[in-house]
Image (cartoon, rainbow, N blue to C red):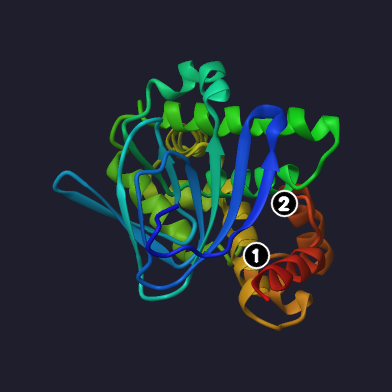
């Protein structure tokens, strides 16, 4: 932490696998320097600068900083909340083969990484022996997927259009067969290419977008859960509740209570 400003984070330690987890609530215009970690942006965002380059990391971004790689962060005009996972040296040694393919500055926008990070945060708050195993497996999965992602070739233009279409229409019913006809791509090839570039099938990606939409609404509104579920694209509240708990380890109601308690 820099000395000029020091927010008071909720700190969760998980020493079994050498991980420190910080739930940081950062004020506008906050500055942070040289710090190696995995960082998931929950709300707000920041600009990261190194050499003569800069990148904006907004809500839902996952930032992976390799060991001993410095960077300068300037947070935006709105308050920012991040989950920061510090991996201690012994853990780096165990996962060195996963870090090697990553560049010094790795930024990921896939919803799969966001969901995995939330699951990791949930498990870190538990203390049982099984949770320790799950934490390590989740971290390995995040790093492995990130490493694989660095080797992907540029996605074809039609796949970019599919991605943008899903980003805009995920709350509506999605039919892969209809999309394949629209873009002139066989549905099997479409799904395989999407999985290769984005880490999951189209249906799973739509589900993750809907879950993220619901999560954000639960965090930022006082609407009842049923209309949130419907607005996000789920058939009903029970549909959302079942998938939300599978993904994040908490029911929508429990997540909302936890989120509001952490902000208070």
Q: From what the image shows, is residue 191 above or below residue 90?
A: below
Identified at 68% across, 48% down, the residue is 12
Q: Which mark is residue 77?
A: none
Residue 237 left/right relative to 50 = right
| Position of residue 83 measured from the top left corner of the image (x, y, whole percent) | 56, 53
**Residue occupied by mark 2:** 248
Check whether the beta carbons of the residues at disc 2 and disc 1 lie within 8 A of each other.
Answer: yes
Identified at 28% across, 35% down, the residue is 154
Res 211 quadrant in image:
bottom right
Nearest the viewer among 141 and 263 is: 263
Nearest the viewer among 60 and 151 is: 60
Nearest the viewer among 213 and 173 is: 213
| Position of residue 145 measured from the top left corner of the image (x, y, whole percent) | 50, 31
Secondary element under disc 2, as helix, strand or loop, is helix
Residue 164 left/right relative to 178 = left
Identified at 47% across, 73% down, the residue is 79
Identified at 46% across, 46% down, the residue is 180
Res 90 quadrant in image:
top right
Q: Residues within 10 Å of mark 1 (few under 14, many from 20)?
A: many
Res 75 quadrant in image:
bottom left
Residue at the extreme left of the image, as rendered: 52
**Can I make out residue 114 in this image?**
yes
Nearest the viewer among 143 and 73 is: 73
Q: Quick one: label 2 or label 1, which is nearer the N terminus?
A: 1
**Can I make out residue 236 in this image?**
no
| Position of residue 149 measured from the top left corner of the image (x, y, whole percent) | 41, 32
Q: Which mark is residue 215?
A: 1
Secondary element under disc 1, as helix, strand or loop, is helix
């Amino acid at each position: 932490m820099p000395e000029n400003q020091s927010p008071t984070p909720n700190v969760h330690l998980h020493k079994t696998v050498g991980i420190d987890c910080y739930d940081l609530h950062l004020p506008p215009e906050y500055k942070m320097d040289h710090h190696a970690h995995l960082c998931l942006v929950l709300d707000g965002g920041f600009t990261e600068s190194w050499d003569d380059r800069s990148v904006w990391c907004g809500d839902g971004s996952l930032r992976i900083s390799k060991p001993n790689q410095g960077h300068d962060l300037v947070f935006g005009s709105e308050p920012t909340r991040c989950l920061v996972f510090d991996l201690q040296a012994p853990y780096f040694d165990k996962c060195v083969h996963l870090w090697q393919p990553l560049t010094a500055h790795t930024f990921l926008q896939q919803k799969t990484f966001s969901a995995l990070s939330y699951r990791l945060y949930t498990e870190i708050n538990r203390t049982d022996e099984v949770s320790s195993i799950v934490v390590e497996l989740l971290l390995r999965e995040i790093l492995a997927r990130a490493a694989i992602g660095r080797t992907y070739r540029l996605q074809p233009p039609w796949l970019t259009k599919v991605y943008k279409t899903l980003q805009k229409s995920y709350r509506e019913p999605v039919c892969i067969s209809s999309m394949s006809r629209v873009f002139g791509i066989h549905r099997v090839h479409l799904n395989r290419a999407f999985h290769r570039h984005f880490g999951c099938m189209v249906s799973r990606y739509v589900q993750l977008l809907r879950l993220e939409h619901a999560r954000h609404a639960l965090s930022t509104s006082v609407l009842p859960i049923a209309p949130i579920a419907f607005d996000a694209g789920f058939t009903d509240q029970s549909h959302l509740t079942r998938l939300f708990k599978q993904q994040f380890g908490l029911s929508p109601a429990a997540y909302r209570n936890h989120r509001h308690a952490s902000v208070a």
